[in-house]
Image (cartoon, rainbow, N blue to C red):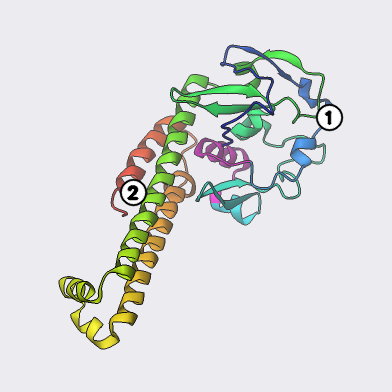
Amino acid sequence: MLRYDDINEISDGKLYGPDDMVKADTAGCNGCAKCCESNMSDTIVLDPFDIFNMTKASGKSFDELLTSFQVELGVKDAIILPHLKMDKGCTFLNEEKRCSIHKFRPSICRLFPLGRIYNDKGFDYFLQVDECSQKEREDIKVREWLGIDNLEEHSAFILKWHRFIKFEQKKVREINERAENEAHRIETVSEDDLTVYAGIVGDSELIARDGIAKYRKNKAEEFRCSASDNVKEVMKTVLRVFYMDGYDHNHDFFEQFDNRMKSCLSELRHIN
């Protein structure tokens, strides 16, 4: 899920649509596998469609992909998402230095050396000019290079997922900000007002037992801990609904995704 805000330094300065020609065709890479052998760290972030395809290709569940160290979880843009384990190159690269799941490879792998840049209406493609070691590339239509069936439906999914991730980030941020505001209020309110507050929330015996200073400290920490637990619950819910719960490979992914989106949003509404 690579996203760029400024592409001037890495692109040819052009934006492409699915039916535009772009100089991206590497002619099968001519035996090169440098991008797959590189330490890409946590940059190959996996979306639900990637996991749907990878579990289908490998015959492994999402949990088995994790326990076999082919996929890892990591913090990306303040939330937890899965990514390919790439500290020593891609584990799906076979002895012939070819992708063992090429037909089902992740979206970011399909894009390369293209990237996506999002805007208010959707997203465009751009060419990363210096990232690929294959300098002699031919023109090819973007949709042909991607090789995704039902590209329009897939593009709609990509946009929905991008917007959902923005929503998740916003929810996490709001939970933390709300808790921090409450903690700050407790830490700075007068002793008299804090005593009144304790009475309202049923903590009169607690404040009498612990004293003002200890009650103030513990109450502020309580807000922060509660926020931390709620943030974890948000992330666990997203991972479970979209990644951990297995997909039915005999049925349309996009329909399953839309149903999971409704279910996830319903669950997240109850986490504050």
Dot placed on the residue nearer the N-terminal end, 1 or 2: 1
- In the figure, is residue 33 to the left or right of 173? right
Q: What main secondary structure does the magenta stretch of the protein show?
A: helix
Q: Residues within 10 Å of mark 2 (few under 14, many from 20)?
A: some
In the image, what residue occupies the spot 63% across and 28% down?
A: 7
Part of the protein shown in magenta: 44-62
Residue in front for this viewpoint, 83 or 150: 83
Name the element at disc 1.
helix
Locate the C terminus by quadrant.
bottom left
In this view, 63 is above or below 226: above
Q: Is residue 86 visible?
A: yes
- In the figure, is residue 242 to the left or right of 43? left
| Residue at the spot of label 2 | 268
Q: Is residue 150 visible?
A: no
Q: Residues within 10 Å of mark 1 (few under 14, many from 20)?
A: few
- In the figure, is residue 141 to the left or right of 197? right
Residue 237 image point, x, y percent: 40, 51
Residue 201 image point, x, y percent: 19, 71
Locate the N terminus by quadrant.
top right
In the image, what residue occupies the spot 63% across and 41% down?
A: 44
Verify whether residue 58 appears in magenta: yes
Verify whether residue 131 appears in magenta: no
Count of marks placed on residues: 2
Residue 247 image point, x, y percent: 47, 41
Give the residue type that dot 1 points to: Gly
In this view, 242 is above or below 128: below
In the image, what residue occupies the spot 23% across and 73% down?
A: 194
In the image, what residue occupies the spot 57% across and 52% down?
A: 73
Give the residue type that dot 2 points to: Leu
- Mark-to-mark CA distance, 1 and 2: 46 Å
| Residue at the spot of label 1 | 31
Residue in front for this viewpoint, 194 or 44: 194
